[in-house]
Image (tube, rainbow, N blue to C red):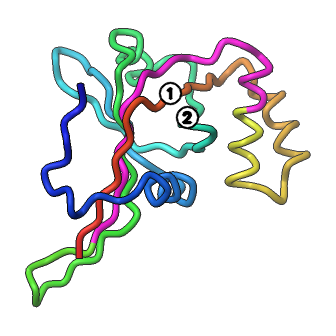
């Protein structure tokens, strides 16, 4: 179903690829956009237990795309160092393919938002929980259940 990587020698192990997802703070979500144009948007996220989680407003382009087609991809760039004299780039990246869904269970939503606070503002968990309660109705959580994950590096 998913293509094999053309340059298999550049493939990272699943462990190395997951480490990229765990360590980084932003990635690019690609969804089916308007008028058959792909829509790719950078966002903050959390990786947990084979899933990518992010929060967003209750309406918007990415949600419309997910509603039209749950299949998405998510790319994280871990390294991008240009070596001009060698006409080369040292790079590391991960790409996840999966199905996205809006989290509707309140407990799942709370847990996901707490994971976001723990990753981005760990010293502020209590005030983060207060913030979650205050903004509860104004945000959604989206979960991408990863079906295929690849990592690639070049030197």
- Against 21, residue 64 (above or below) is above
Within 10 Å of disc 2 (Cα), the crowding (few <14, some 14-19, many 20+) is some
Is 144 left, or right, of 55 in this rendering? left
Label of residue 10 in the image:
none
Q: Looking at the image, do the residues carrying marks 1 and 2 touch, with CB atoms under 8 Å apart?
A: yes
Q: Going 81% across and 28% down the picture, which residue do you hit?
A: 134
Within 10 Å of disc 1 (Cα), the crowding (few <14, some 14-19, many 20+) is many
- Against 67, residue 61 (above or below) is below
Label 2 SS:
strand
**The magenta stretch spans residue 70:** no
Q: Going 49% across and 56% down the picture, which residue do you hit?
A: 15
Disc 1 versus disc 2: distance between alpha carbons?
5 Å
Percent across and percent down for residue 28 are: 37, 43
The residue under label 2 is 51
Label of residue 145 in the image:
1
Q: Earlier in the sequence, mark 1 or mark 2?
A: 2
Boundaries of the magenta span: 91-111
């Amino acid at each position: 179903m998913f293509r094999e990587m053309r340059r298999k020698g550049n493939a990272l192990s699943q462990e190395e690829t997951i480490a990229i997802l765990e360590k980084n703070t932003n990635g690019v979500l690609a969804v089916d956009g308007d008028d058959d144009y792909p829509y790719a948007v950078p966002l903050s996220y959390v990786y947990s237990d084979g899933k990518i989680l992010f929060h967003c407003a209750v309406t918007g382009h990415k949600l419309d795309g997910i509603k039209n087609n749950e299949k998405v991809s998510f790319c994280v760039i871990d390294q991008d160092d240009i070596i001009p004299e060698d006409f080369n780039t040292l790079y590391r990246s991960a790409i996840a393919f999966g199905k996205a869904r809006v989290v509707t269970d309140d407990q799942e939503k709370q847990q996901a938002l707490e994971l976001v606070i723990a990753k981005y503002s760990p010293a502020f968990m209590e005030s983060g929980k207060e913030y979650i309660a205050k903004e509860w109705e104004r945000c959604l959580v989206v979960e991408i259940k990863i079906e295929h994950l690849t990592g690639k590096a070049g030197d």
